[in-house]
Amino acid sequence: MFDHIQAFHRPRNIQEALRLIQDGGGGGRFLAGGTDLAVQADRSVRFLVDLSKLGLNYIRPSGSGWAIGATTTMAELEKSPAIRALANGILAKAAASCGTVQNRNMATLGGNLVNASPAADTATPLLALDAVVTFTDAQGQRTTALAGFFSGPHRTAAGGALLVEVEVPEPPAGARAGWSFRKLGRTQSDISLVNAAAGLGVGPDNCVQWVRIALGAVAPTPMRAANAEKLLAGRKLEPGVIDEAAAEVAREVRPISDIRASADYRRQMSGVLVKRALQECARQAECAL
Amino acid sequence: MNTIEIGVKINGDSKRWTIAPGDLLLDVLRREGYYGVKRGCESGECGACTVLLDGKAINSCVMFAAQADGCELLTIEGLAQGDTLDPIQEAFLERGAVQCGYCTPGMILSAKAFLAHQPNPTEDEVRDALAGNLCRCTGYLKPVEAVLAAAEACRRSARER
């Protein structure tokens, strides 16, 4: 099935990995866990550049947030005490729902993002957390907001550059805040029909000081629900307001129908998931509804 | 066709294999005679091809063989010590946790990796640990009971030692 692959390289540093891709005459592909690449069986791939020995497997403090190396596995994310503690563990929960145990032992965070499935489970919490991604190529390093990274289904702004790190900034300060990740799938490890992540902070008057809502599998790319966020900003958090925001989410998603679910169902479930996510955030923020 | 050589330690034995750069680990293992590694969905969903790579359960159908270079592998063939079965294998036999048997090697290896880190699991944890191993005879109850029984047997023998 993979007789078109003529070479397998395992470089020891990033420069060598970039050089191999650049000098290979086209058809080179970076390989992280391989769980997507081996299934897609893309016949244009002529050689593989294995990223496992580049030292990109880490979770460490960075400024006031966390830096996660691109080849960190889903299993490592879901088990990391730091990631489990960050924003109520929404990234750890998403990683834990990314396929079965066997997949999560191989699949990487960088791979999940670069594969750019509209349903990528880790993309949704990372969008809500305002994550930034760092790439490197022959021209050097560049850092960009994850929000601007996805350009369509399985398309990104990476070009031929290598994703090396995902940085999650410290969530907004303030004692009364909450975070939630919700996923709807046929089973816990199945691909998302819809997924949602939300975070919010409230002031002493229960007014929303900041709010972030992200969704997956309901648009060509993982998305932020900008209209619903605007609707909530500054409002007093009450059940009716959460319902309004959920309805706004259902309006602004752009789902398709496919083998797993209809667009109508996805649209309706987007509102349901965001409502539950906001309710969970409110509970954590000790906001009686 | 270009070939490359990889070195692995499999079931305790050091081996060098000549492979094609695009060979999948599943294909190489079966070519080398490890028939306990089953070919199922070939898309990383059913877990029939599960092996342990450096102690972690992985699907060998969605991994290139070259990725395993320098790693330690365990297949179902390497689990028994001579004629002495692993406690998980014993428990699967005792509990009748095998129907057609196709998913059994993968289930047992997933359980092996899981119990190494969680010797005292709850039933829910066992179900999570086996979630990546599909049984189409639909017999999950007895495998779950078998893993719980194996965990108990291992704890008992650890106390007796």
Image (spheres, rainbow, N blue to C red):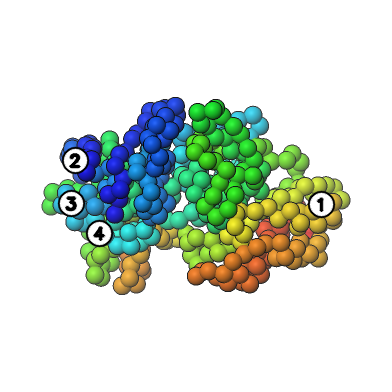
Write down the chain letter for disc 4: B
State how far apart marks 3 and 1 are (Cα). 61 Å
Going by the numbered disc 4, the residue's amino acid type is Lys
Q: Mark 3 and 1 residues: CB-CB less than 8 Å, in contact?
A: no
Whether residue A260 can be seen here: yes
Crowding around mark 1 (Cα neighbors within 10 Å: few <14, some 14 to 19, many 20+) is some
Between label 2 and label 1, give the one nearer the viewer: 2
Q: Which dot marks residue B18? A: 2
Residue behind mark 4: B38
Q: Is residue A91 left or right of residue A198?
A: left
Write down the chain letter for disc 3: B
**Residue A54 locus on image (x, y percent):** 42, 31
**Residue B130 locus on image (x, y percent):** 38, 59
Going by the numbered disc 2, the residue's amino acid type is Thr
Marks 2 and 1 share the same chain: no
Task: Give above or below for A66 relative to A115.
Answer: above
Residue behind mark 1: A233
Q: Which of marks 3 and 2 is nearer the N terminus?
A: 2
**Residue B40 locus on image (x, y percent):** 29, 62
Q: Earlier in the sequence, mark 2 or mark 4?
A: 2
Element type at marker 1? loop
Q: Mark 3 and 4 residues: CB-CB less than 8 Å, in contact?
A: no
Residue at left 35%, top 64%? B134
Element type at marker 4? loop
Marks 3 and 4 share the same chain: yes
Between label 3 and label 4, give the one nearer the viewer: 3
The quadrant of the picture occupied by the N terminus of chain A is: bottom left
Crowding around mark 4 (Cα neighbors within 10 Å: few <14, some 14 to 19, many 20+) is many
Going by the numbered disc 3, the residue's amino acid type is Arg
